[in-house]
Image (tube, rainbow, N blue to C red):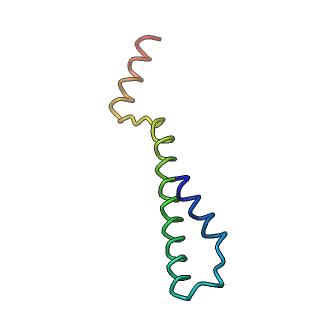
Amino acid sequence: MSILIARVETIKAMDISALSSSERKELRNELRAIKSDLKERNKSDLKSIDGGGTIYLSVGAIIVIILLLILLL
């Protein structure tokens, strides 16, 4: 990820006015590709952090829990 960020910084530091229009277009496409890649990596990082805390219970499991609580209390 730091390689991609370093590449973006390198592109920002370049003198774009000296480039031809096709070279500018290639740089623009490269920046868009890097941006979308970084967004996807951030989404996957957030999913891996957030995904572990979710618990799903079925209706049957809830009924069993309620019955156990009634019997025990």
Residue at the (56%, 88%) spot, across then down: 20
Residue at the (52%, 58%) spot, across then down: 38
Name the one closer to the observer, 37 or 62.
Answer: 37
Name the one closer to the observer, 11 or 68.
Answer: 11
Residue at the (40%, 23%) spot, across then down: 65
> Where is residue 9 drawn, in percent x and y?
63, 63
When the figure is inspected, residue 3 is found, relative to residue 58, above or below; the finding is: below
> Where is residue 35 drawn, in percent x and y?
54, 65
User: In the displayed structure, does residue 65 sit left or right of residue 9?
Assistant: left
When the figure is inspected, residue 43 is found, relative to residue 7, above or below; the finding is: above
Considering every residue shown, the one lying at the far front of the view is 18
Residue at the (35%, 29%) spot, across then down: 61
> Where is residue 56 drawn, in percent x and y?
40, 37
> Where is residue 1 drawn, in percent x and y?
52, 53
When the figure is inspected, residue 9 is found, relative to residue 22, above or below; the finding is: above
Considering every residue shown, the one lying at the far top of the view is 72
